[in-house]
Amino acid sequence: MTLGESSGADVQEPIPEPDAKAARRRLWRRIRRIGYWSVGLLVGIPLAMFWITYLVIDVRSPQEVLAQLNKTVDLQYSDGSELLKVVPADGDRSFVPYAQVPAKLRDAIIATEDPTFWENQGFDPTGIGRAFLTGVGGGSGITQQYIKKSTGDDDATIWRKFAELVLATKITQQQSKEQIFESYVNIISFGRGTFGPAAAMNAYFGRKLDDSMTWSEAAFLAGMIQSPSVHDPAASGDAHAARRWQYVRDKLVGRGYVKGDEIAKMAYPGNEIQSPTETRAGRLSYDQYHIKQQVLAELEMDGFPINRLQQGNMTVETTLDRGKQEAAKNVLQEKLKGEPAEFRGSIVAVEPKTGAVRAYEGGDQGVRDYASTPHPAGTAFYPFTAAAALRQGFGVFQPFPSPERIEFLGETFQYPDHCSQKCTMVMAMRKQADAPFIQLAKVLGADAVSKAARDAGIPELVDGAPTMREKDGFLIGSGIAIGRYPLRPLDMAGAYATFAADGVHAAPYLVAKVRDDKGNVVWEHTGTARPAFDADGSNSAQVAAGVTETLRNNLSDGRPAALRTGEAERGNSEEKQDAWAVGYTSQLATAVWLGTDDERRLRDAEGEIVLGSTIPADIWRGFMDAAHRSLPPEPLGPAPAVALPPRR
């Protein structure tokens, strides 16, 4: 090989310039094709799905929907026997044309449920985005709500939401906004078994639907739509309903529907609201009505509002035991016979291991449910103070000071010495002494006492209002030491059940199962049991055992039980305004409350001061004896430790 020559194996000939450009063009053409196909698939598939869904699925007319809503929902006892029927009131499904819906009610509903209704295309993208990001409501406007109600499909699935958006678009193109609103307002539930504004106006205000409706009435009815079983003042009280009314009122004012002098004229219409139509019509007794409202409120929180139950022709199996429920009603009536007519009472019985409510008697004197109405717990609160002390290392037989005068959080407490100066928790509980538990609360601190009650099962909120707090909703005052804060009998029974279940808390519940029209179970309660006072179950059990030791008692047949009777004082006098008997066996925890509607002093038919150890204790024993007749005796709790290691 001579100089200037090179081997073809060592040197590659360069690609001609035109060929390189052609290769690059082919590469970019390939990339563009892939991009076009990707975009096409990303856009085309959803569009194809949208149009197929658009063509295949239709929205039913309100007349069709109304015809199918008229179904009875059966509520059953735990054994499958009939408890009661939820039947819509006569005439509560009358159709109201758009022009006959008062303008004030239309504005109140739109301001609250869908402020962009007149402009949007069936859904509010902003609201959907907010609901997606926060996990809180706001994603469904009036058009989407109508579709959910008309189809009966309220499942939280992507397909359901997609179909809802397609149908919302379709109905917006096919019908005017006035027609959509007319369809919506005639199938929506306002509570009390009513569908549509005419039935709602009659049920709540006893009046015909016309333009005489006030802004205050319109705000009240519009507020019912979100959760009628919860917002009805007959179920949750005027305080809760007034808060919901205020929310709607603020929306009306903030969005410019109510202006000037009309704002000042608006007021919560509590005195105008009538008793529930079904109660007045005699379809249900008052105590049955209380059960119905509690069950429906619980179902609503579990995703089964009344309209879904009625559309699906569903059956609800409750936890209530027929024999125990009848015993609660009969014993309460028998023990109050001959006593002052203003006396009111309630009984709630909970199965400790599961939280199942086996008896729920809210009284038969009116629509007010005394089992779910908070009342000052008084000295029946002391077991929670004992639990707080036990988890901090105190022993039930450990002596501690019992001064007659105690300063606590700015308040002076002075009680006679019912116990020795070195009193134990067992002695103090049995002698009904106050000073030892007030002194314990001072030593432990209000937060520790409140936490023990919370851990036992007293909820943080009831109807949106904080429990065991001052009016500001944050501070815990000196009243925690003597049970001044109001608590519901339902919650007291559930919290005492934690002691009965060896320190394991299971939240009380009334709904066991929901079945469809074919008998298939579509929803079932799942257990919530957890150690209450310590993550270590054995430590939690020892706290419960200590509390049980301070409350030991017996039923009439000798089986072991625990009982605490107590009272709440009326002002600073020796008179009582609330009297309690709360206790348990290992099989049943029961709370009995006795009081009046207007917090008057409690004096029996003989003029004697009513204590928890008198009429309430008689009611408790009468019910517990009847409830346990078919149950074999069981031991109650282990022996308590001398003292637990203090928590740090």
Image (cartoon, helix red, strand yellow):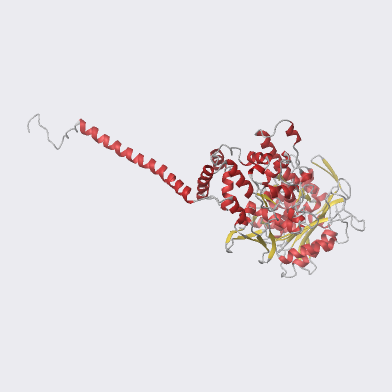
Res. 90 in view: yes
Residue closer to the observer: 422 or 9 = 9
- The image quadrant that residue 123 belongs to is top right
Res. 154 in view: no
Residue closer to the observer: 243 or 179 = 179
- The image quadrant that residue 619 belongs to is bottom right
Picture coordinates of residue 265 (x, y %)? 76, 35
Picture coordinates of residue 86 (x, y %)? 68, 58
Image position of 86 (left or right of 146) = right
Q: Quadrant of the N terminus?
A: top left
Picture coordinates of residue 448 (x, y %)? 72, 46
Return the residue found at the far right.
606
Residue closer to the observer: 593 or 75 = 75
Return the residue found at the far left.
2
- The image quadrant that residue 337 belongs to is bottom right
All told, the count of numbered labels is 0
Picture coordinates of residue 549 (x, y %)? 76, 59
